[in-house]
Image (cartoon, rainbow, N blue to C red):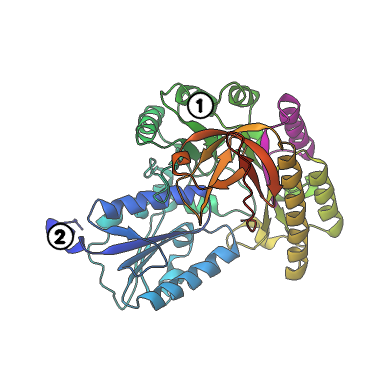
Amino acid sequence: MLWHVSAFLKSMNKKVALHTLGCKLNFSETAAIGKQFTTRGFSVVDFSDHADVYVLNTCSVTDNAEKECRQVIRRVLKQNHKAFVIVTGCYAQLRPDEIAKIDGVDAVLGSNEKFDLFSYLDDFEKKDLACIYTSSKSELDNNFGIASSTDIDSRTRAYFKIQDGCDYKCTYCTIPLARGASRSLEPEKVVEQFRSIVAQGYKEIILTGVNVGDYGKSFEIDFYHLLKKLILVEGDFRIRISSIEPNLLTDEIISLTLSTEKLCKHFHIPLQSGTDKILRLMQRRYTIEDYKTLISKLNNIDPEIGIGVDVITGFPGETEGDFQETYNFLRELEISYLHVFTYSERPDTKAVSLPGKVGKEEKKRRSSLLRILSDKKRFAFQEKFIGKKERVLFEEANDDGIIKGFTSNYIKVFHPFMSELQNQFTEVTIEKVLGNYCNASLEGKNFSVERLAV
């Protein structure tokens, strides 16, 4: 189907709302979807507003994401029962028939199709039956999709997709099925599009992908050498790596990161379990000793570096003793915070058939304990910076008189709103830790901004 001039004119007064479930990569791709609409005359509105078209970009990592998908669809139809509802993303790629049966869904687009939405849809009038457009696994493996995309809700940070797919075989994960094999954007295109993002005024560029550290397998350039090229681009910016596997975080990348302000002093490094037994069941590519050595190395080189950790609770076979071993392992690690995920069964994964299922309430208890530990870790890490000067990138939003920002090592900072701070690197002094954020003073002025932890 072709998008004709007459269709463009019809869309001039139409509104589209976009919603993202899941990871930073999904946010990047949602922005790319939004651009397809805006270039065709649509205006983008908040997802809670009345819109003609609603697009939901889904995740397949957790069971909650699928439940939320259904809840979101019901909610938007209450806002406008005549709205055209499009569901795309990983869940749509893996379970298109299930989604098509949800009342109110008009179109289901797979992982490839979302990047060329208007080739499949030229009419946003509701139908009796949902249309399904998805690609095969082999087609996913050979198509990178749109790489350059930015968060349409912010002029401060840009999510830049440079890699897609995954060759790892973790037993709990559906991502290889939903996104295909590991593949990367050509380095020349990465640099070209990176320059364009910087030229648009973005000050923080977040490099995203399913497995970013795996960048460049099909090229004669790896992730480290790509980073070397990017930090040479002219402009006032910094680069944040969204997440990197522990076996791919090399000494070269660490050394480069600590040698320049262009790279954030922050690594988010998945662990998933603190026992070798569970790591083997998950088919992860490292041991507990490997991980501990990496974290110790980072802290010995720079004790102020920010380190985030992913961990999964309630994986099949995880006994109470295994959980305690994981808890104790994390308690002793010098890290900044945890991202805690409660294991949920995903169809077509090896983990589904593993023995030793953990009950729902027990998984919830274990997750709660680790989230409390995360709060303690974050507080202790932030407390080390009281009285110190830090460079903060403040965002554009005015949130009830508050402006928020992040340091290079991922400390969240609040300050009374000042328009001149928007999208600017500013030196502040950390004054006080309040929950998961800090108050900071500017030029000797000490303000108190006490808010609920967010």
Q: Does the magenta-highlighted stretch encompass residue 365?
A: no
Q: Earlier in the sequence, mark 1 or mark 2?
A: 2
Front-lying residue, 158 or 203: 203
Element carrying mark 2: helix
Q: In which quadrant of the rendered image does the N terminus lie?
A: bottom left
- Residue nearest the observer in this picture, 384 or 139: 384
Tell me if I can see residue 357 in this picture: no
* Residue displayed at 40% across by 42% down: 144
**Residue placed farthest to the front in the image?**
445
- Residue drawn at the location 64% of the way across and 45% of the way down: 439
Which label is found at residue 57? none
Percent x, y for residue 328? 84, 48
Q: Secondary structure at mark 1?
A: helix
- The amino acid pointed to by label 1 is Leu
Q: Is residue 36 visible?
A: yes
Of residue 60 and residue 300, the one placed in the foreground of this image is 300
Q: Residues within 10 Å of mark 2 (few under 14, many from 20)?
A: few
The percent position of residue 443, horizontal first and vertical second, equals: 58, 33
Residue occupying image coordinates x 65% and y 56%: 453
Query: Which segment is the magenta one?
Result: 283-311
Which part of the image, by quadrant, shows the C terminus? bottom right
Disc 2: which residue: 9
Disc 2 residue type (three-letter): Leu
Question: Is 305 one of the magenta-colored residues?
Answer: yes
Mark number displayed over residue 227:
1
